[in-house]
Image (tube, rainbow, N blue to C red):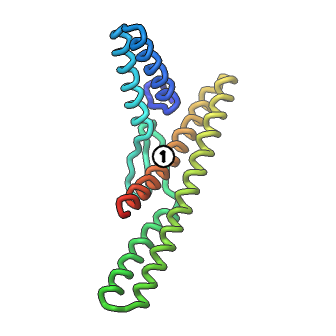
Amino acid sequence: MSDNQSSSLKSAADAVTGAAQSAYGSVTGNTEHQVKGDAHKDAAAAEKEASNTIGKIGPYSISSSGGVSSDDPRRTEGSYNQTAGSAKETLGGLVGNEGLKQAGQKQNQEGKEQEAEGQLRDAGSGLKDRVQGTLGGIGAGITGDREAQLKHQQQHDDGKTQLRSAQADIQRQADAAAENK
């Protein structure tokens, strides 16, 4: 990852630095330090947001760091089954066909389970790639192998994108469930 790319760890360190500088300015009455600290915290928040930003087109995701990932097929299949199941359930309810309604409920539930399994697999795989990419990059940095460093950085970035994509979908579902309560 180059210095101009977003980083969750860097943003966390910058937030701590900004908070400390702001607190120092507040305690000493030095408004210049307080303002600079607050600006540092704001920049860290923007950095964190950029670090978590992904774009998604169908089952493909890309992050601000250039990582690319493809969703586990269970996520797409699960989403399809939820939609088809909901349609059957609604149609069964409208026409008074209890069998169709129950079949739709079952398909919807199975779709939710499929999608959740795919999300967990993507989150686990993404985390694994982030860790392996980080450790591999450290090893390559120690040996001075720039090509291997870049390869491991791409592995890290792709893993981060895959993990963030799964996290974003899980959060979206949690928010929708909270709204429906």
Disc 1 designates what residue?
164
**Residue 60 image point, x, y percent:** 44, 53
* Nearest to the observer: residue 123 or residue 20: 20
Above or below residue 2? Residue 122 is below
* Residue 121 in the image: above or below residue 109: above
Residue at the (61%, 37%) spot, across then down? 133
Which of 79 and 56 lies nearest the eye of the viewer? Answer: 79
Residue 66 picture location, percent across and down: 45, 39
Q: Tell me where residue 135 appears, x and y as whole percent.
A: 66, 34
Circle 1 residues within 10 Å: few <14, some 14–19, many ≥20: many
Name which residue lies at 46% across and 28% down: 11
Give the residue at x 33% y 84%: 91
Q: Residue at the spot x=51%, y=48% of the render?
A: 162
Front-lying residue, 67 or 162: 162
Q: Secondary structure at mark 1?
A: helix
Instruction: Please state which amino acid type lies under the numbered disc 1.
Output: Arg
